[in-house]
Image (tube, rainbow, N blue to C red):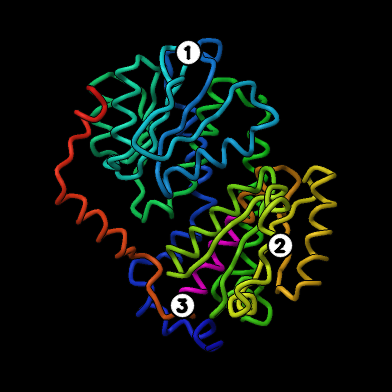
Amino acid sequence: MANRLNDRTQWPQWDRDQMLARIAELPMQCRDAWRLGRELRLSFDRNAIRQVVVLGMGGSAIGGALLGDLLADTCPLPIIVVRGYTLPAFVEGKETLVIGCSYSGNTEETLTTFREALVRGTRAVAVTTGGKLAALAQEYDLPIARFDYRSQPRAALGYSFVSLLGIFSRLKLLPDDYQGDVEEAIQVMEAWQVEIGPDVPTPQNTAKSLAERLVGRLPVIYGAGFLTAVANRWKTQFNENSKHWAFFESLPELHHNAVVGLRIPPALHDHVTVLMLRSALDFSRIQARWDVTAELLQREGVAFEVLNGRGKSKLAQMLSLIHFGDYVSYYLALLNAVDPSPVQTIAFLKKRLEEIPWSPEAASGA
């Protein structure tokens, strides 16, 4: 099986849509997305809004979740992510900025809530490649952060996340020198990529070797604070790229429930690997909890791995761990003998739902 990761002649039969190339382009995406958000023309400023609501699903929603975790202790405005068909009652009026994120522009949940936000008179921005979302934004003369990047939605993370950072910079909700954090994150990803790229043999490649250790096992990813949504990203990349069961938990919450269930069922116990995403920037008490968690897992005989973010800034640590996790999920897909790009189960769900009568306009009241 190890030969499958070191003999690239076999890879084209699995990676027909070149997911590996998309993963490698994440640093480039981030640079372009930062520019895209920074150059977006907005007719209002920070003082006009009191809260930000990001609408999205799947790979288009994770950007909002990452944004919220990253800026939780610095942004004066609450950032709420809505995944679904309905808006919270508080979302209304010009003091709310709604950002609709949909790679295709045709995600029915996002279209439904975006239309409802317009009915409620909120300010709105669209982040998309086009589709119905772009058409709706044009109809209402709204700002559109439109990008042209052909991939699976999850592979366009740079645009779904860093374009939002650019918009926040445009609104002066980030420090004036935040460009430095963006550049650091890009450089850290590019440097780590040299160590974990496809041409680096498994014994020297930490991403390949981790993927090998996860074959046939159930990954459970732990994250804390600003790395919580990063843990979720790892989980979903294992699901979609590797076609593999995975789950994630957040610290310290998991200390109040999940740790009690480590032993049962015993058949599962022996096939779980906990992946702990740590950072030197974690809150001091969280650092202590990480150490105790490692002790607990060791005592219970649960396999675990510790993975640390790279870089000085929170953004660099987030994006470096995301980039590393993307490579791990790709290599695990090869070991699972599956194509990382297609998501046939999701395509089946969409097809079946298309057969059931549905009117987003009626649902939103538009």
Task: Give the image quarter of residue 240.
Answer: bottom left
**Cα distance, mark 3 to mark 2?**
22 Å
Query: Residue at coordinates 51% horizontally, 14% vertically from top-left?
Result: 49
Query: Residue at coordinates 58% horizontally, 57% vertically from top-left?
Result: 248
**Overall secondary structure of the magenta section:** helix
* SS at mark 1 in the image: loop
Q: For mark 3, what is the residue?
A: 334
For the C terminus, which image quadrant?
top left
In the displayed structure, 275 sits above or below 199; it is above
Q: Amino acid at mark 2?
A: Leu
Q: Nearer the viewer, residue 134 or 336?
A: 336
* SS at mark 2 in the image: strand
Q: Nearer the viewer, residue 322 or 348?
A: 348
Q: For mark 1, what is the residue?
A: 95
Residue 144 locus on image (x, y percent): 35, 29
Q: Amino acid at mark 1?
A: Glu
Mark 3 or mark 2, which has the lower sequence index? 2
Residue 98 locus on image (x, y percent): 42, 25
* The magenta segment: 322-333
**Cα distance, mark 1 to mark 3?**
48 Å
Which mark lies nearer to you, 1 or 3? 1
Mark 1 or mark 3, which has the lower sequence index? 1
Answer whether labels 1 and 2 touch (C-beta < 8 Å): no
Residue 277 locus on image (x, y percent): 69, 57
Is 328 contained in the magenta span? yes
Q: Nearer the viewer, residue 241 or 23?
A: 241
Which numbered marker is on residue 307? 2
Horizontal relation, residue 326 to residue 290: left or right: left
- Circle 2 residues within 10 Å: few <14, some 14–19, many ≥20: some
Residue 329 locus on image (x, y percent): 52, 67
**Cα distance, mark 1 to mark 2?**
40 Å
